[in-house]
Image: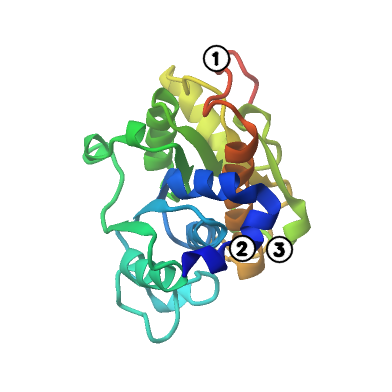
Amino acid sequence: MTDGIFSRTALLFGDTGVERLQSLRVIIFGVGGVGSWCAESLVRTGIGHLTMVDCDVVCDSNVNRQLMATTKTVGRPKVEVMRERLLEINPNADIIARQEVFSAETAENFDLDAYDYVIDAIDSLKDKALLILRACESGACLFSSMGAARKLDPQRVRVTEFWKVEGDPLARTLRKRFKHDGVFPARKFQCVYSDERPSGEVGGTAAHVTAVFGLTLAAQVILHSMTSPTNTLPAAEEDESL
């Protein structure tokens, strides 16, 4: 059954490429407006082992942008709804749903070395900073989402190394936090961000932007796994500008 659903993927990457994707282990922190689209794109492309971490339940305000959020799923844990959906796409996939938060109190519960890729789609600043530090110390390759809220133009979505992100308030705040604490990520990592000037009210979001963020994160995993001999990037430089 799964041979047929990945036939188009095999036309791009070959049978060996599909086997590579099916063997990869990916963990996503945050399955909201960005992470949900990333998760689905990964599984549809052929990722065989996916862990999703999110403590929240679906609420009404999620329906405008989160893939699993509908009027019928309101009140249910996001990771459970997403797992059901992903297993309908690929029943043979290893999909793990962890309804919990990543924080200083729970960080030791996550063995990031057990994964090839870590996807950061966390909203909380302090938890995001901690995940970045922990992921960069692990053997996994990290890809991180910066702020998608208050952005309207999906054509302004970009990918670059964290210290080179421009025009993103979240990246700027994270860099200030690292500098203030004197603790820096152990290596460089790629970020998905938008250089568009924020619009509208705080908290405003649109599916056509958050989805592009998530799909772009998934693309980074797929492209990196097909082209890079290692899962690491060069060591980070501590003396970077804001």
Residue density around tag 1, few if under 14, some if 14–19, many if 20 or more, within 10 Å: some
Kind of residue sitting beneath label 2: Ser
Q: How many marks?
A: 3
Kind of residue at disc 3? Leu
227 up-or-down from 74: above or below: above
Residue type at mark 1 is Glu
Q: Is residue 88 left or right of residue 231?
A: left
Q: CA distance from mark 2 to mark 3?
A: 34 Å
Numbered tag placed on residue 7 in the rendering: 2
The residue under the point 30% across, 75% down is 76
Relative to 127, 215 lies left or right:
right
Report x, y in % for residue 70. 45, 81
**227 up-or-down from 26: above or below:** above
Of label 2 and label 1, which has the lower sequence position? 2
What whole-number distance in Å separates the C-alpha atoms at marks 2 and 1?
Answer: 45 Å
* Relative horizontal placement of residue 92, taking residue 104 as reference (left or right): right
Of circles 2 and 1, the one toward us is 2
